[in-house]
Image (spheres, rainbow, N blue to C red):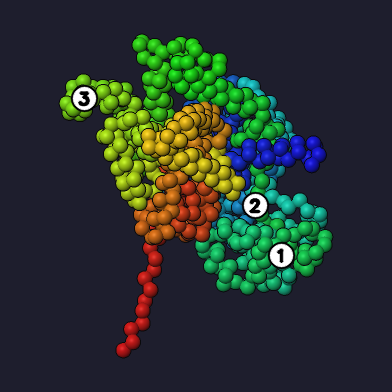
Amino acid sequence: MNKVSIISKAGHLVGGVLRTADMPTRRPVLRDHFESTVDNVFIVGDLAGAPVIKLALEQGEELAQHLSGLLRVGGLAVDYDVVVAGAGAAGLAVALRLQEKGHRVLVIEKTELAATFRDFPKGKFIYAEPVSRENHSALDFTEAPKEELIERWQRQVEAAGIPLHCGEALTGVTPGVPLVVKTVKSEYRARFLVVASGVRGNPRKLGLAGEDLPHVLHKLYNPGLYVSKKILVVGGGNSAAEAAIALSAQNQVVLMHRGAALERLFGENRKRLAASTVEVRLNSELKSFETGPALEFDQIFVLIGADLPTGFLKSLGVRLENEWDWKRWLGLLVMFAIAYSIYGIKLGKGEEFWPYRGWGYEAMSFFGRGWSFWYTVLYTSVVTVFGLQAMKRWGIDKKDKFQIYRFASLIGFQWTFFFLIPEFLFAWAVKYQWVGESLAKDPNFANNAWRSYGIVYAWPLFFYTFFSNPSDVWIVWGVILSFVLLPILVLFHGKRYCTWICGCGGLAETLGDRWRHLAPKGRAAISWERMNLIVLGAAVVITVLMLGQDVVKAFREPAGTGIKYYRLVVDTWLVGIVPVALYPFFGGKVWCRYWCPLAKMMEAWASFYTRMRWSRFAIVADNKCIACGECSRNCQVGIDVMSYALQQKELNNQNSSCIGCGICITVCPMTVLTFGKIVEPVKLIQIQR
């Protein structure tokens, strides 16, 4: 292999790793109130992750209220207070409410009002899902055929007197106060710009020869126009399936998909497709529209989704998620330096990492307390502050009691078992003999407050419980916790220990929460989870060596060496430095997912319980999934939850590394997912008379 190819492969590998957080459609980076990385430029609707019309309306209403508050403060010589780019649901909701409040608004639209609806097949019914959420926006929206809805919106905009410039696409913006908004026809000075252009107007293409031929289309407007044709539909999603079904009424239709199964179909579409005359060709892929199988057909529809208008957003100066520019690399370097310093100094006086060796621990010790104590104070403070933020985000704001209790549990366990007990209560329990006179006077127990971490931390996450001449109390409790209580907990709750109790998981779920959507995804990322088998194996070997060294003298040297390097590699680098440094880039669950031996052991138990049909833990789905992807996007351990939901397949620890945080359930706009077990249908037996 030559040098160039080696460099190329290495670059491809690094690029692949850095892109593991990407969803099929990336999103722009948004700050509070949907503000983009360009000051005073806001993004709502499809581009901001609103998967259904009602949620787009909610975003539009929320942004309108925010902008109205800003517009009441001060004034500028501008043409319009707000320019809205996009006359869809979110854009019109913003414009109507601001106009109602007396602000000057202009709506510009690349094509026509409600262009997304116009692209739908003729007569398509638009549902007002989710039914449980009311529409509080200024835009009228109730279930109706697309034509009726478009007409209603057109009348409402005209009645409100909002200037609507159709056929006028946004081309750029000059930052400043005010903004200069540029279109294909003019320029406008405005306080704010709202981009609500969506993604459906940018259909994804295969990039094959002949894709621009007249008989190759990327949208289906009216199935009734095609009669007695041989038609090919390319795609594996719901749009492709619905088009194929509609066209099959009067034509011979083939649905081609490159995958081995149509995993992303709604349950209803799956049934309709099975009952139709559509021929489904799986594991099939076109190479060209000018040769091969493509020549068999009179008409070809390529319906494989839409691409984010990346070039357009970048031309506005908007940054996208997971972009590895120099600022991101610098951020990684800074995070690494912080984590390296915190954990490198924590090793203890004389054991610090360079350049802190010999002075770092002492320099970070204050008021008679060493850095280990202040590290615990820092850790607890971070879990508390960011835990309350996460509780507000997922629990209070979304009115989800499960998430409120979960974050309260993480904060409570951190304060009680990982701070107050080891740092204060243990010493008081010994001093005032709360643990009994014999234990209080036993130096082997009384002088080892650090062992109290073993009250909650189980083997092999905290295997020091059994080492260095421990009191019998710790040995007995360690065995009960690790091999009795934890297996029972797993039976009923899967791996929820990671998201309700564990301090390592607590930091990941709180500090790491804001970056949960950056968790590595895909098959390669899941295959990396085998690394924690290596750590689990190392923990088992070292435990055997440490416990057996008094009996087998040959174990003493490897036991000492093993514990030394385990403490350095696992307890310092893999628990602390590497995962914490990677939080803002690969989500919070790097340690828990890829290296934690306890997580892998619990997963093995949970998998066994599921196989034996004993497990009481699973996530199940009904048939209402709309394939919005919010569940998969927000999964801290990178599970493609949506694929399970679409197939109504039980999600458990036999087929995934689910930690039971429940965020996928919380974010689902259709309340598709729930904790529970699939109830198997009762088989009726014919009784012979």
Could you tell me residue 486's position as x and y percent?
34, 45
User: Outermost residue, bottom direction?
Assistant: 689
**Residue tagged 3:** 440
- The CA span between labels 3 and 2 is 68 Å
Q: Indicate which disc, 3 or 2, sits on the residue closer to the N terminus.
A: 2
Could you tell me residue 188's position as x and y percent?
67, 29
Residue 305 is marked as 2
Could you tell me residue 346's position as x and y percent?
45, 21
- The CA span between labels 1 and 2 is 16 Å
Residue shown at the point (73%, 70%) measured from the top left:
230
Q: Is 5 on the left or on the right of 584, as rendered?
A: right
Q: Is 575 on the left or on the right of 151, as rendered?
A: left
The amino acid type, in three-letter code, at marker 1 is: Leu
- Using the image as rendered, state which of residue 687 and residue 107 is in the foreground: 687
Q: Secondary structure at mark 3?
A: helix
Which dot, 1 or 3, sits closer to the camera? 3
Q: Secondary structure at mark 2?
A: loop
Residue 232 is marked as 1
